[in-house]
Image: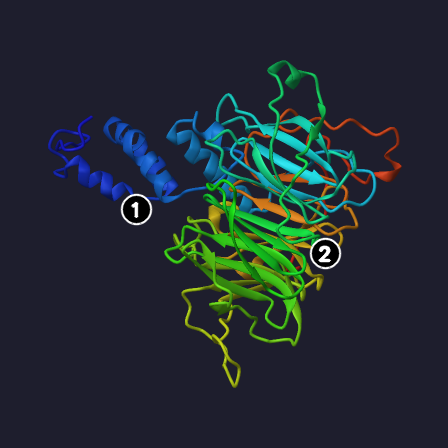
């Protein structure tokens, strides 16, 4: 069909050219396009050829785990999946699933994700979950437990993993950087299991690690890492920071010292003025440092603080917002989780600043939005952004495996949910996508799936324990969802 013909449902009835109609369609909602497609054959063809793809461009739903499957779906199927997921988010309806049986002991896991895999690192073990395709948008894309790797040093000693991140490797999604409690850092290429092994259940392998790992920060624990393009940001527990150029061999680094107990990082290299954000325990616990000529500025360019300032606080989790969020396509949004139980949103474009007084340096930037669960004052350990309409914030609490959710378009209508198994634990890590939330407590990883088409085969089968006495997980009658406890922040809300 030409985009420049004068057309109509009946000859001569609509004098508008097709390209004008296409521009008009870009302003329509999902329901409007459905209605228009039912009016006549002409508009049905026009919506299917141009309308749905234009709608997708204007209503992105970023998702690593759905990336491969969505590439196989047509535009209408993708729009339908997104619309059903958004509806489920608006109703707080989801399927809860643990991804494994509880681990032995209390661990502090970390997560990493790519378009092909989810990594769950706990202790000295990395569990690899591979994303699978689906036969159509009516069936949810699934996950398989692909492998379990136990990391040992050359002297056969175990070291706990404290951070993990995927780095660019031309789309293979097998190259990671791993940080350890002893301060070392290693680049690893995960072995690729044979196709036959995928049908044989769990795989156990021992990786022989290099004898000369990177040690940028002495024996300080590698607390947090973030990757942006060919840049790797590394933060130690005592505030030593390195920005590495992954394209260089050997690695070239720019280093600064925050000189305080440090917890979290966020790296933005797509911004017109690249920057890094650090969460610490200090009088100024959230600070922005600019990046110029591949080097970090030693002094912060901006301090981000709450409206009510405490003498000393801490920031444990930091996230950016998706480009499709209600704030617009911008890398200037910083979402943070604080010790006082609040989640704060700072917009680096904002001019709302605190009174500077007699202090030196930049005036502190105040949040544009502050969120909290009124029924919990626990510290926030992890934050992530995405969800329905790319407008949600998820926050992991320090106790009872609670995850709180807010839609920033109506922040007063937040709600919270306990993780499967109701572990008496912090939620140490979160990754929020368009229709899925991946999280991890001290005992297990889990997923909340808001998308359609989830079945008992979507996620890995979890063998029943010999005795249920130690595990509070309860399977629903449908055979694949697990019971979880949920509550609204406004208890009068339906």
Q: Is residue 38 above or below residue 443?
A: above
Q: Is residue 362 left or right of residue 479?
A: left
Q: Which residue is mark 2?
A: 398
Residue 382 position within the rendered picture, expressed as x and y whole percent measured from the top left: 63, 53
Q: Nearer the viewer, residue 72 or 314?
A: 314
Q: Residue at x 31, y 38 (%)?
A: 54
Task: Answer whether residue 318 is visible to the viewer in this image.
Answer: no
Q: Nearer the viewer, residue 182 or 164?
A: 182
Q: Residue at x 53, y 59 (%)?
A: 277
Q: Is residue 194 above or below residue 106?
A: above
Which is more N-terminal, label 2 or label 1? 1
**Circle 1 crowding by C-alpha within 10 Å: few under 14, some 14–19, many from 20:** some
Q: Is residue 493 left or right of residue 351?
A: right
**Circle 2 crowding by C-alpha within 10 Å: few under 14, some 14–19, many from 20:** many
Q: Which residue is mark 1?
A: 27
Q: Residue at x 63, y 13 (%)?
A: 196
Residue 136 position within the rendered picture, expressed as x and y whole percent measured from the top left: 48, 23
Under circle 1, the secondary element is loop
Residue 370 position within the rendered picture, expressed as x and y whole percent measured from the top left: 56, 65
Q: CA distance from mark 1 to mark 2?
A: 43 Å
Q: Nearer the viewer, residue 301 or 120?
A: 301
Under circle 2, the secondary element is loop
Q: Nearer the viewer, mark 1 or mark 2?
A: 2
Q: Is residue 321 above or below residue 117?
A: below
Residue 229: quarter of image? top left
């Amino acid at each position: 069909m030409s985009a420049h013909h004068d057309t109509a449902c009946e000859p001569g009835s609509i004098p508008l050219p097709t390209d004008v109609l296409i521009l008009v369609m870009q302003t329509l909602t999902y329901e409007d396009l459905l209605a228009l497609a039912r009016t006549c054959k002409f508009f049905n063809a026009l919506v299917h050829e141009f309308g749905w793809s234009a709608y997708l461009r204007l209503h992105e739903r970023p998702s690593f785990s759905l990336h491969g499957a969505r590439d196989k779906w047509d535009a209408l199927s993708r729009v339908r999946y997104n619309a059903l997921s958004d509806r489920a988010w608006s109703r707080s309806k989801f399927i809860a699933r643990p991804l494994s049986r509880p681990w032995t002991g209390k661990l502090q896991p970390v997560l990493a994700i790519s378009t092909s895999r989810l990594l769950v690192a706990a202790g000295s073990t990395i569990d690899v979950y591979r994303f699978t395709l689906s036969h159509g948008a009516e069936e949810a894309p699934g996950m398989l437990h692909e492998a379990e790797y136990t990391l040992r040093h050359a002297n056969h000693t175990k070291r706990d993993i404290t951070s993990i991140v995927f780095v660019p490797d031309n789309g293979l999604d097998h190259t990671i950087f791993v940080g350890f409690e002893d301060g070392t850092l290693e680049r690893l290429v995960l072995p690729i299991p044979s196709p036959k092994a995928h049908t044989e259940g769990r795989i156990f392998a021992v990786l022989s690690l290099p004898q000369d790992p990177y040690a940028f920060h002495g024996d300080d624990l590698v607390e947090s890492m973030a990757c942006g393009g060919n840049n790797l940001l590394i933060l130690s527990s005592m505030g030593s920071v390195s920005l590495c150029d992954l394209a260089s061999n050997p690695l070239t680094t720019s280093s600064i010292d925050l000189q305080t107990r440090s917890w979290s990082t966020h790296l933005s290299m797509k911004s017109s003025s690249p920057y890094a954000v650090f969460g610490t325990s200090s009088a100024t616990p959230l600070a922005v440092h600019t990046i110029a000529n591949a080097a970090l500025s030693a002094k912060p360019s901006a301090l981000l603080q709450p409206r009510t300032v405490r003498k000393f606080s801490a920031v444990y989790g930091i996230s950016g917002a998706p480009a499709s969020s209600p704030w617009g396509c911008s890398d200037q949004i910083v979402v943070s989780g604080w010790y006082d139980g609040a989640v704060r949103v700072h917009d680096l474009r904002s001019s709302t600043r605190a009174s500077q007084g007699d202090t030196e340096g930049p005036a502190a930037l105040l949040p544009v939005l502050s969120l909290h669960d009124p029924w919990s004052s626990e510290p926030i350990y992890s934050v992530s952004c995405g969800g329905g309409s790319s407008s949600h914030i998820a926050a992991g609490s320090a106790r009872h495996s609670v995850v709180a959710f807010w839609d920033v378009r109506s922040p007063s209508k937040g709600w919270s949910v306990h993780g499967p198994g109701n572990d008496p634990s912090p939620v140490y890590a979160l990754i929020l996508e368009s229709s899925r939330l991946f999280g991890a407590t001290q005992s297990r990883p889990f997923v909340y799936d808001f998308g359609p088409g989830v079945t008992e085969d979507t996620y890995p089968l979890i063998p029943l324990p010999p005795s249920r006495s130690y595990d509070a997980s309860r399977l629903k009658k449908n055979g694949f969802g697990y019971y979880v406890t949920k509550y609204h922040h406004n208890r009068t809300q339906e």
